Amino acid sequence: MKVLVTGSSGFIGQALAQRLKAEGWEVQGLDKLPGPSTDFVCDILDARQLQETVQACAPDALVHLAARIDIDETADVSDYPANVEGVRNVIDAVRRTPSIKRTAWTSSQLVCRVDYAPKSDTDYNPDSSYGRSKVLTEQIVREQDGGGTQWCLVRPTTVWGPGMSAHYRRFLRMIQRGYYFHIGREPLLKSFSYVGNITYQYRQLLKASPEQMHRKTFYLADYEPLDLVAWGDAFQRGLRARPIPRIPVLLARAMAHSGDAAIALGLKQFPLTSRRLKNILTEYQFDLTATEAICGPLPSTFQQSVDETVEWFSNLS
């Protein structure tokens, strides 16, 4: 199978292209930025160039990952054109490329706020402009029937591992330097996804029968929820850092209010805000039964994932 991956210079896209290539798949990558897994430098907002590129590639399947993914509390949905117009352009290019039989369209868990349990695949409740833009992504895919292909929508949760973003590198650096702290004394269980496992899940969805995946929506995450406290402590041990201290929730709330004030005064970033604190303290676990039924056991255990991430981060340092 020949696969085209959009967003191939991004965290998940690059890891997916590398996995598929290592397993003997024919893979090409498309991204607006150059990268080791990107064969075509193309902005999905350039409809004409995109169409020409996709048709020239003539893949059998397309995995759509290209998107603006940051959460900017000052942004509007219109600031996320890649997630709306870009999706329309990719669907149009797919529809005009007869070789493409299967597509996987990447959405986000944030089509619903983290403390909301949706009652159906179309029960949306976002609390950010990014989340609202991903609702539009899903609605466009459904309205256009995935460009006339066998298609599925996937909602990754928080993804971590080698190659992860600067935000999570800062998290590891804070642990390494002894600046990080746990909040409260209770475990915090979340459906996170190790990058080596989520790329395996994408691979399995590309191989699944139409009856298993067509017109369906899947959350992608490790099947066992991750305890945020145990996660941090595992990195602390791997990095040989000092034990991570704990602070009371009330103190964290006071710090978060200070962060809110700093943002309101024009500061672009602050380590802790009320929104970020809420996300830290809110537990979320998704029903991954359908995903597990198709994808089967995941290749990396929790400890393997931590060890591989520590090795990658240590080599960066």
Image (spheres, helix red, strand yellow):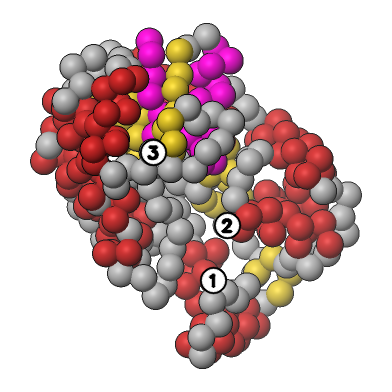
* Residue type beneath disc 1: Leu
Question: Residue 111 at what x, y percent from top left?
Answer: 31, 54
* Residue type beneath disc 2: Leu
Is residue 229 shown above or below 143? below
Helix, strand or loop status at disc 1: helix
Q: Which residue is mark 2?
A: 188
| Image quarter in which the N terminus is found | top left
- Point out the frontmost of discs 3 and 1: 3
Q: Residue at x 43, y 53 (%)?
A: 69
Helix, strand or loop status at disc 3: loop
Q: Residue at x 79, y 68 (%)?
A: 179
Q: Which residue is mark 1?
A: 277
Q: Earlier in the sequence, mark 3 or mark 1?
A: 3
The alpha-carbon separation of the residues under discs 2 and 3 comes to 40 Å
Q: Residue at x 40, y 59 (%)?
A: 114
- Point out the frontmost of discs 1 and 2: 1
Q: Is residue 277 magenta?
A: no
Asked whether residue 297 is in view, the answer is: no
Q: Earlier in the sequence, mark 1 or mark 2?
A: 2
Question: Residue 187 at what x, y percent from top left?
Answer: 61, 57
Q: Along the line of sight, which residue is nearer the eye, 57 or 131?
A: 57
Q: Residue at x 88, y 49 (%)?
A: 240
Q: Which residues are magenta?
A: 1-23
Q: Along the line of sight, which residue is nearer the eye, 48 or 75?
A: 48
User: Mark 3 Cα within 10 Å, few/some/many (few <14, many 20+)?
Assistant: many
Q: Which residue is mark 3?
A: 42
